[in-house]
Image (cartoon, rainbow, N blue to C red):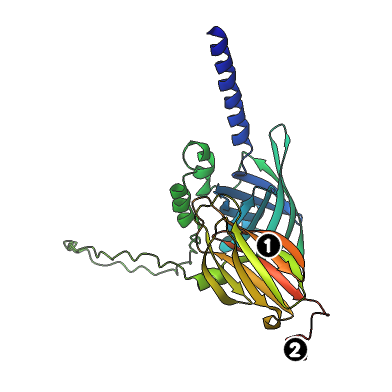
Amino acid sequence: MKKLLFLLSLAVVFIFFITIETNAQMITGVWHGRINRQKIEIKIVQKGDSLIGTSYYYQSPGNYRRYSIRGYFDGINNEAVWWDDQFLEEKTGRMNIGSSGKYELISRADFNCPGGGIMKLDGNAALKKNEDKSKGEVHLDKTNNTAFNDEWDFVIENYTVGANDPFVIDSVNMIARQPAPVLQPQPERTVIPAREEPAPKPIAVAEEKRPITPLKPLTIEEKFTQRQKVPIMEIPVSGDSIELNFYDNAEIDGDSITLFLNEKLIFQHIYLTDKAFTVKIPVSDLQQTNELVMVAENLGSIPPNTSFMVANVGGKRYEARLVSTEGSSAMIKFVKNDITGTSPEKK
């Protein structure tokens, strides 16, 4: 009996330290460092596989530009992807911050934990509107200190004791995404003394109650237009047709998707299971370069929405894991080979 109690105690201690280590290696937190040698502070909060928060490009705490950020975390590759989503605030000091934070960026970085409580995000950044234009390297370190106090501090400080609840995160996000008000200087007024008269009695005015209008859900076309399109791979096209098979990539949890080809909806309400949903596309219907975008209709019960695609093209097999979130959609490029046939422009 004593031996059993001793083994149980060891198990409890082991689980306790594993829990501490797991909590210590969260991507949620405050990150300091540089992007393209520009000082930046980023506050990242993880919700499922999605990332939200805020970024500060700064020279000093009184001289910065601030954006809300969105992104996702790829647990398989241990990679974080985030982008400047909405400009919120600019504050200038004695020195103008110039081009710091002037352009919206998208960053991709590996999440590294070399030990000793050290955590790093190392990767590269590019222009959000043109990912082919690099904007330098990303080097960030996780820290317990912040130079900018905002709404996300409460969530980060209490993340492991209840603030990781999606309702709490969504509520704070609604507040944090509101741009800071711009104060306009008031013109000086000349005050003319007036005769003292008894103050009029206040008149009670009934407060006008305005109905709360619920937010209208986005259509699938609006989701396609507004979400960031993340390139996954490029497939050369040959032969007469391409065959695409879509499966749920993990546990079947109710994921459904819509497919757009060259900005046109071709299939909707595709329910992902362990059985293939097959799409065949004639090569003659394709352009020279084609973009197939997978848009998540929902995130299922286990976010994000992930599918496993098998493409059979010209006798070759290609595989890809496609991830779609509330802020991004996966994109596959199909490019005709010169020997495939005459492109539409040459007909």
Asked whether disc 1 touches disc 2, contact meaning CB atoms under 8 Å apart, the reply is no
Q: Is residue 284 above or below residue 274?
A: below
Q: Residue furthest bottom?
A: 347
Res 132 visible = no
Numbered circle sitting on residue 27: none
Q: Position of residue 271 (x, y in %)?
A: 52, 62
User: Residue drawn at (60%, 58%), measured in percent from left and top?
Assistant: 247
Disc 1 target residue: 310
Amino acid type of disc 1?
Answer: Val
Q: Nearer the viewer, residue 129 or 309?
A: 309
Disc 2 target residue: 345
Q: Is residue 216 above or below residue 93?
A: below
Res 135 visible = yes
Relative side of 129 to 338, left or right: left
Q: Nearer the viewer, residue 343 or 229?
A: 343
User: Residue drawn at (65%, 76%), measured in percent from left and top?
Assistant: 281
Q: CA distance from mark 1 to mark 2?
A: 29 Å
User: Residue drawn at (59%, 18%), measured in percent from left and top?
Assistant: 10
Amino acid type of disc 2?
Answer: Glu
Q: Position of residue 107 (x, y in %)?
A: 69, 57
As helix, strand or loop, the secondary structure at mark 2 comes to helix
